Image (cartoon, rainbow, N blue to C red):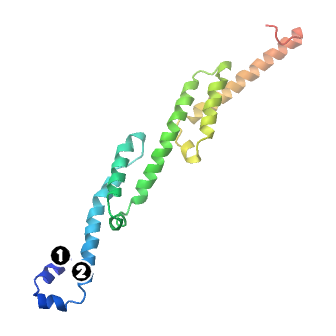
């Protein structure tokens, strides 16, 4: 492209008038400019790497750089799908974070844990599948549910034994 431009520029005005495919040169120059503008944005996108909550600033920088491009330049960004996937993953992780906190807040399971377990379960169930996949402590929730169910079963068994002995569920 540079050689063609130099050769064209070296022509006289009369010779330039004879060039019938000058538009091919200007189109190539425009495409090269678009490619050159897209390259730093592609590098920013590649720099995102593994998406975590700490990736937010890198994702935002890549998005801002991409949005600043012209439509023709945007068309030259070959890894745009990586940016949109990173944005989606970050959004899913942000949605999962409060649910993880609710699960951690359950703590040691007692008969008084029903509300905390139910709140965590409801919050988890309200997430999309992609968001649920980002909840890193889901096993704690299922373990808490199982422990609570065991405590209820034990309590029910004790109450049945009391009833058999006394005929009164309220006796202690």
Q: Are marks 2 and 1 in contact (CB under 8 Å)?
A: no
Question: For residue 68, what is the image quadrant?
Answer: bottom left
Give the Cα separation between the discs numbered 2 and 1.
Answer: 9 Å
Look at the picture and state if 164 lies above or below 114: above
Q: Which mark is residue 54?
A: none
Whole-percent x, y for residue 43 in the image: 31, 56
Residue that carries the numbered disc 1 in the rendered image: 2
Sequence order check, earlier mark of 2 and 1? 1
Query: From the viewer's perspective, is 111 left or right of 54?
Result: right
Circle 2 Cα neighbour tier, 10 Å, few/some/many (<14 / 14–19 / ≥20)? some
Q: Residue at x 11, y 86 (%)?
A: 11
Picture quarter containing residue 9? bottom left
- The spot of residue 154 in percent (x, y) is 75, 19
Would residue 117 be found to the left or right of residue 41 on screen? right
Residue ID at (65%, 25%): 115
Q: Nearer the viewer, residue 12 or 55?
A: 12
Query: Disc 2 or disc 1, which is closer to the eye?
Result: 2
**The C terminus is located in which quarter?**
top right
**Count of labels shown?**
2
Callout 1: SS: helix
Sort mark 1 into few (<14), some (14-19) or many (20+) by Cα contacts within 10 Å: few
Name the residue tied to disc 2: 25
Q: Residue at x 16, y 88 (%)?
A: 16
Q: Give coordinates of residue 7: x percent, y percent.
A: 14, 83
What residue appears at the point 32 percent right and 65 percent down from the top-left corner? Answer: 73
Quick one: SS at disc 2?
Answer: helix
Quadrant where the N terminus sits is bottom left
Tell me where residue 97 appears, x and y as whole percent.
Answer: 50, 36
Tell me if residue 169 comes above or below residue 47 in the rendering.
above
């Amino acid at each position: 492209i540079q050689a063609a431009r130099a050769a064209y520029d070296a022509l006289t005005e009369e010779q330039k008038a004879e060039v019938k495919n000058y538009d091919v040169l200007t189109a190539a120059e425009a495409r090269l400019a678009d490619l050159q503008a897209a390259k730093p944005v592609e590098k920013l996108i590649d720099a995102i790497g593994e998406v975590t909550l700490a990736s937010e600033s890198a994702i935002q920088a890549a998005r801002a750089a991409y949005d600043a491009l012209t439509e023709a330049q945007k068309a030259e960004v070959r890894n745009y799908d990586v940016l949109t996937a990173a944005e989606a993953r970050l959004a899913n992780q942000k949605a999962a974070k409060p649910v993880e906190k609710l699960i951690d807040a359950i703590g040691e399971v007692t008969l008084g844990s029903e509300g905390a377990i139910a709140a965590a379960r409801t919050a988890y169930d309200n997430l999309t599948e992609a968001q649920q996949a980002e909840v890193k402590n889901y096993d704690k929730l299922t373990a808490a549910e199982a422990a609570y169910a065991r405590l209820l079963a034990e309590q029910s068994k004790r109450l049945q034994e009391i009833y058999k002995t006394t005929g009164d569920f309220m006796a202690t």
